[in-house]
């Protein structure tokens, strides 16, 4: 009888791979990988030579059907992995797992590293319940509505975020829940692992003083118990970037432009976040021009 193994892989530190995961990967007939190049490096580190096939968000629908047909006709041991962590947790995998269940194929979990669990334990928050939201919406309006929809909840809210958008997310959280406590973990299990704890404004201030923090993947844990959402503000934080750019184009430095907005009554933490966004945008534009 065929078996589909859901195998967790290290999220940074290779020493976190389990003995069972190594055995299952070595004994499988085929490994379905989100990115075969990434998984090939992992397998090479442990001397595993199992055949790799790609299964990612763009081909998962077709690959699921093909693999389930093969597993139904033959007796195959198939290991499903993503680039890091556990398949199906804000990563590809759910479609083929569901298809396997529907086809009567046995599905087994090989648990291991998970950024979500690591960040929760690092937060020190003692709530027994949490809701995992994965990646929140990119658009500012949708993001604010999503955050406001969490008002009144007593469980922890957990998010994943990329280094390119974390400042915007922190800014939005600070706008909606300025008094809420937050734990922000980055580079989990890696050499430069770091967790910052405080209000969104306090964390933003740390980011503003050290742009080196804007590296790596992030997991945020937000404590909402007893916290109310802020009422709508007349000036949206989203427009701060354009106001900063306008001042810079008029001939002042970004630092002076930021000071000007603070003097005009804008919250310092929101201005810091907007300044980080402007710097990042300028850097990306320069890279594209030079490339």
Image: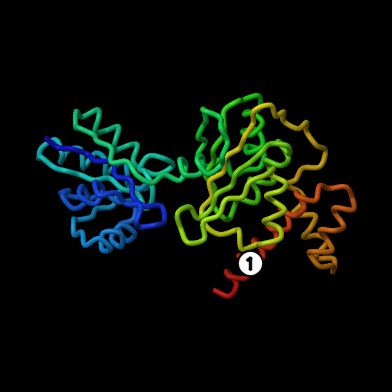
Q: Position of residue 86 (x, y in %)?
A: 36, 43
In this rendering, position of residue 252 left or right of residue 34:
right
Residue 78, compared with residue 37, is above or below; it is above
Q: Residue at x 65, y 49 (%)?
A: 168
Q: Position of residue 111 (x, y in %)?
A: 32, 41
Q: Residue at x 21, y 42 (%)?
A: 66
In this rendering, position of residue 111 left or right of residue 130:
left
Q: Position of residue 170 (x, y in %)?
A: 66, 46
Q: Residue at x 53, y 53 (%)?
A: 186
In this rendering, position of residue 200 left or right of residue 123:
right
Quadrant of residue 147 in the image? top right
* Residue to which mark 1 is pinned: 283
Camera-side residue: 179 or 257? Answer: 179
Q: Residue at x 25, y 60 (%)?
A: 46
Quadrant of residue 180 in the image? top right
* Image quarter hosting the N terminus: top left
Residue 108, compared with residue 286, is above or below; it is above
């Amino acid at each position: 009888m065929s078996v589909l193994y859901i195998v967790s892989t290290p999220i940074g530190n290779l020493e976190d791979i389990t003995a069972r995961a190594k055995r299952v990967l070595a004994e499988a007939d085929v490994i379905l990988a989100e990115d075969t190049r990434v998984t090939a490096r992992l397998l090479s580190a442990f001397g595993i030579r199992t055949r790799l096939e790609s299964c990612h968000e763009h081909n998962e629908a077709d690959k699921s059907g093909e693999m389930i047909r093969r597993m139904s006709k033959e007796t195959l041991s198939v290991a499903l992995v993503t680039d890091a962590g556990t398949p199906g947790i804000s990563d590809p995998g759910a479609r083929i797992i569901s298809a396997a269940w529907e086809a009567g194929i046995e599905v087994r979990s090989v648990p291991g590293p998970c950024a979500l669990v690591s960040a929760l334990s690092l937060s020190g928050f003692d709530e027994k319940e949490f809701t995992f939201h994965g990646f929140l919406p990119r658009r500012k309006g949708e993001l604010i509505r999503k955050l406001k929809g969490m008002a009144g909840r007593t469980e922890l809210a957990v998010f994943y975020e990329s280094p390119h958008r974390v400042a915007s997310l922190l800014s939005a959280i600070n706008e909606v829940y300025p008094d809420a406590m937050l734990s922000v973990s980055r580079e989990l299990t890696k050499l430069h692992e770091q967790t910052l704890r405080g209000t969104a404004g306090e964390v933003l201030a740390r980011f503003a003083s050290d742009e080196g923090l804007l590296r790596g993947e992030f997991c945020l844990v937000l404590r909402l118990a007893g916290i109310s959402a802020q009422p709508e503000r007349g000036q949206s934080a989203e427009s701060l970037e354009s106001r900063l750019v306008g001042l810079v184009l008029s001939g002042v430095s970004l630092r002076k432009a930021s000071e000007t907005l603070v003097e005009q009554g804008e919250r310092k933490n929101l201005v810091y976040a907007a300044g980080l966004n402007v710097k990042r945008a300028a850097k990306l534009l320069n890279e594209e021009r030079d490339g």
